[in-house]
Amino acid sequence: MEIIEENHGGINIFKLNGRLDSNTSQGFEKKIFQAIDDGSKNMIIDFKDLDYISSAGLRVILKATKALKREEGKMMLCDMQDYVKEVFEIAGFDSFLPIVNSRDDALQRF
Amino acid sequence: MGKNKITFKLKNKLSELDTLCQKLEGFGESIGLSPKFIFETNLALDELFTNIISYGYNDKKVHLITVNISLQDNELLFSIEDDGIPFNPTEVDEPDLGCTIEECKIGGLGIHLAKNLMDEVCYQRCKDKNILTLKKNIAEPQPAKKRVKG
C-alpha cells in the first residue's frame, strides 16, 4: 500500500492507495501516529484509491480518531468506494466517524 | 467442470494475505464473479485467516492452512482447515455496534464482518483440525439484505 502525505493549511491529508489489511496496517499506524506526535490535530484520510480495507485498517482509524479527540482535534474520512464504505457500515463505524463524499467537503468541515 | 473448484495452501504468515487475494481474484474472474462479490469474499476469508494465524499457534513453526472453494449452482462453498489450537470463531461475542466512539471496542469485529459477508459460517473440530465451512449465495441481482446489527 502506498501512503501519500500532504499538508493543506495545517490539515494533514493521508491519501491511501492499494490495500489496507493486517499486512499493511502497521505502516499506516506508524505514519499517522508520527504525525500526531509531531502535533498534528486535524487530519483527512482520502480513500479515493483504496481498493480494500479489513478490520485491521478499521482498528488503526478508530485508534487515531480517539487519540485526536483527546487532543481536541478531528479526523474526516472522504471519497470511499461503495464497498469500502459498506465495511464501515457493517462495523457500525459510520455512526461516529464523519464520512463525506469528497476531499473538498472534508476540508470545509474544519 | 474442474474450473469451478480451487484448492490452495497458505502458510501462517500475514504476507500470505496477498496470495489469498490473488487466488480469489483469479478464481472469481474465471467464474465471472462481480468485483463486489470478490471483495466481500476476500474480506471474509482475510478476517478468518488473520484470526487463525494470530491466535491459532503457540509455536514458531510453519503451518499450512488449506482453503477449498467451489461453485455449486449459485452458491460459493468454502472450507478453511488449520491444525491450530481448538478455536470456534462463531462463538466469539458480537461487538456492541450501538456504542459511542469512547466505548467502542475492536474485539470480535473481524469475525462480525465475516459473518455478515457470508450467508453461513459453521465450525467443527475434527481430527485435531479446525474446519470452517462458509456459504455465500451469489445469485444476481443480490436481494436487498438487511444488515444484522447488535
Image (cartoon, grey):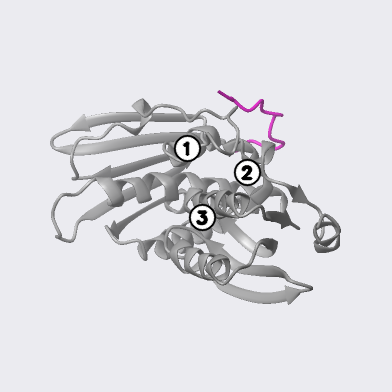
Q: Nearer the viewer, mark 2 or mark 1?
A: 1
Magenta range: B138-150
Q: Residues within 10 Å of mark 2 (few under 14, many from 20)?
A: some
Chain label for disc 3: A
Looking at this view, is A6 or A40 the one in front? A40
Residue behind mark 2 = A88
Residue A94, position in %: x, y? 67, 40
Q: Amino acid at mark 3?
A: Val
Q: What is the C-alpha distance between the residues marked 2 and 1?
A: 14 Å
Task: Give residue A60's mark.
Answer: 3
Q: Is residue B82 left or right of residue A37?
A: left
Residue A95, position in %: x, y? 68, 36
Chain label for disc 2: A
Q: Amino acid at mark 2?
A: Phe
Secondary structure type for disc 3: helix
Residue behind mark 1 = B105
Q: Is residue B45 left or right of residue B51?
A: right
Residue drawn at (51%, 38%) of the image = B113
Q: Is residue A15 left or right of residue B97?
A: right
Residue A102, position in %: x, y? 82, 59
